[in-house]
Image (cartoon, helix red, strand yellow):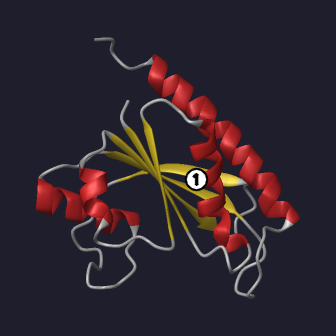
């Protein structure tokens, strides 16, 4: 499985740094066939990376949920705003499809936090705990996906 993981968010805004923190953990795990990218936000430049992947997981902080994380498949959305400097995952997927004719399977992993907006480095205790739960889920998901891939 050629997997691209893009963790994005602003680590200087408390729990908004959950995406980059998650991506750093996965990069340290050195998963086979997994490319990890850490960025401040999604941009049009990510479309080429996305087009080269079989599967993409976008990871970002999530506000206002009682669940520690969410994981959902997303589809390209050609009506999504692509004129902005910051894009939604659906817009990046639509650009990859439009520019390169590729639409990989894609998911969004949202990790819950509670401390946003203030200029602050580091994660809250709640966000840190949820980060661990999301990481455990993700590693189990990758193992299951890898096991289900056809050999050869």
Note whether residue 110 is visible. yes
**Relative to 75, 33 lies left or right:** right
Observer-nearest of 127 and 66: 127
Residue 61: percent from the left, percent from the top? 62, 66
Q: Is residue 102 above or below residue 141?
A: below
Give residue 82's quadrant in the image.
bottom left
Give the residue at x 35% y 83%: 85
- The residue carrying pointer 1 sits among few (fewer than 14), some (14 to 19) or many (20 or more) residues within 10 Å by Cα, namely many
Residue 51: percent from the left, percent from the top? 24, 51
Q: In which quadrant will I find the N terminus?
A: top left
**Relative to 11, 149 lies left or right:** left
Residue 22: percent from the left, percent from the top? 63, 54
Q: Is residue 86 above or below residue 132?
A: below
State the count of labels: 1
Observer-nearest of 142 and 30: 30
Give the residue at x 76% y 76%: 121
SS for callout 1: helix
Q: In which quadrant will I find the C terminus?
A: top left
Q: Which residue is mark 1?
A: 23
**Which residue sits furthest right?**
125
Give the residue at x 29% y 68%: 45
Residue 46: percent from the left, percent from the top? 32, 63
Observer-nearest of 21 and 75: 21
């Amino acid at each position: 499985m050629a997997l691209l993981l893009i963790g994005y968010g602003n680590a200087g805004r408390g729990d908004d740094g959950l995406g980059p923190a998650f991506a750093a953990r996965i990069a340290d795990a050195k998963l086979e066939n997994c490319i990890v990218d850490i960025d401040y936000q999604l941009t049009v430049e990510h479309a080429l990376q996305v087009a080269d992947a079989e599967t993409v997981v976008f990871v970002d902080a999530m506000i206002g949920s009682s669940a520690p994380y969410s994981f959902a498949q997303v589809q390209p959305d050609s009506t999504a705003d692509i004129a902005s400097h910051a894009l939604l995952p659906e817009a990046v997927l639509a650009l990859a499809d439009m520019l390169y004719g590729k639409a990989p399977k894609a998911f969004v992993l949202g990790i819950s936090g509670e401390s946003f907006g203030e200029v602050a480095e580091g994660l809250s205790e709640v966000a840190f705990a949820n980060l661990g739960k999301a990481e455990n889920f993700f590693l189990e998901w990758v193992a299951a996906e890898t096991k289900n891939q056809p050999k050869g």
